[in-house]
Image: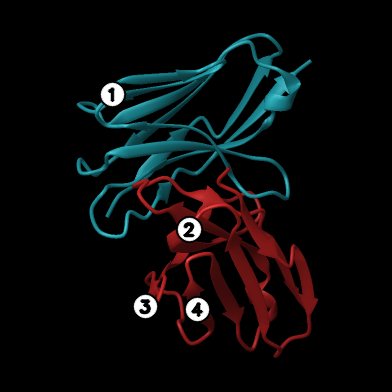
């Protein structure tokens, strides 16, 4: 089955700086890669996703890049703000079967004011 | 759009009782819903996949007789934790996938279960 690794596990950045979180996946059949933000005591919130037919996607301060050959994808947050502090999870799934998501282990992002 | 609700948000029960958690897609129809479990400071672990009108598919190691799942309509799935024990205490989260949007899942706010 799919295996998703995520790094780093914790990340602290100064407010206004950029943050980058990286994930690798093992199953070459995976073709959908979402990123979720989870605040304490809440469910994960989808913030951006990318499908394997594109290499990059951007939504305001958030961007995701995908390298299918190397089987890795990254989340980029620019101009970080205190409200960006949360746990971020990457995930991967394929269009085949029941399309279940395999999650990374999470990154706790702290924005230092 | 794409709002998923869960009820209750918190529940405390005595050991041996059963607890039902509801998951609803509020503004879309979901043929497939997923149930996850999350322990503190850990990632989400898929428990089962729930398809409307058919039996749920459980992940390896998840007891189907203990975690009963019913997906009676395109907007509602329920998880019943039967004969709950303290080790079942956890954060249970559901997600729903909208018809026609492969892969994309929207999550509910979660249910914190505490078994005394």
Residue A10: percent from left, percent from top: 60, 31
Secondary element under disc 4, as helix, strand or loop, is: strand
Residue under label 4, please give it.
B70
- C-alpha span from label 1 to label 2: 27 Å
Which mark sits nearer the N-terminus, 4 or 2? 2
Secondary element under disc 2, as helix, strand or loop, is: loop
Residue that appears at 71% across and 17% down: A81
Residue that appears at 52% across and 56% down: B95
Q: Contact, CB < 8 Å: mark 1 with mark 4?
A: no
Residue under label 1, please give it.
A54
Residue A35: percent from left, percent from top: 48, 35
Q: Is residue A51 visible?
A: yes
Location of residue A86 (image quadrant): top right
Which mark sits nearer the N-terminus, 3 or 2? 2
Residue B80: percent from left, percent from top: 59, 80
Location of residue B60 (image quadrant): bottom left
Residue A14's mark? none
Residue B29's mark? 2
Closest to the observer, A35 or A17: A35
- C-alpha span from label 4 to label 2: 16 Å
Question: Which mark's residue is nearer the viewer, 3 or 2?
Answer: 2
- Mark 4 is surrounded, within 10 Å at the Cα level, by few (under 14), some (14 to 19) or many (20 or more) other residues, namely some
Question: Which mark's residue is nearer the viewer, 4 or 2?
Answer: 2
- Mark 2 is surrounded, within 10 Å at the Cα level, by few (under 14), some (14 to 19) or many (20 or more) other residues, namely some
Secondary element under disc 3, as helix, strand or loop, is: loop
Secondary element under disc 1, as helix, strand or loop, is: loop
Label 3 resides on the chain identified as B
Display colour for chain A: cyan
């Amino acid at each position: 089955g799919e295996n998703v690794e995520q790094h780093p596990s914790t990340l602290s950045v100064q407010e206004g700086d950029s943050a980058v979180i990286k994930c690798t996946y093992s199953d070459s059949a995976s073709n959908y890669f979402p990123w979720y933000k989870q605040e304490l005591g809440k469910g994960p919130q989808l913030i951006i996703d990318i499908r394997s037919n594109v290499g990059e996607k951007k939504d305001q301060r958030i961007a995701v890049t995908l390298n299918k050959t190397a089987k890795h994808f990254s989340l980029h947050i620019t101009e970080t703000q205190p409200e960006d502090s949360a746990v971020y999870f990457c995930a991967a799934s394929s269009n085949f079967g029941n399309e279940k998501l395999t999650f990374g282990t999470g990154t706790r992002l702290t924005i230092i004011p | 759009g794409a709002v998923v609700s869960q009820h209750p948000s918190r529940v405390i029960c005595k050991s041996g009782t059963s607890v039902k958690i509801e998951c609803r897609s509020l503004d879309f129809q979901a043929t497939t819903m997923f149930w996850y479990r999350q322990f503190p400071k850990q990632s989400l672990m898929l428990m089962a996949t729930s398809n409307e009108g058919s039996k749920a598919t459980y992940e390896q190691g998840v007891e189907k007789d203990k975690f009963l799942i019913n997906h009676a309509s395109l907007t509602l799935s329920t998880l019943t934790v039967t004969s709950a024990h303290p080790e079942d205490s956890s954060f249970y989260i559901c997600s729903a996938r909208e018809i026609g949007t492969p892969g994309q899942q929207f999550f509910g706010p979660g249910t914190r279960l505490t078994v005394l």
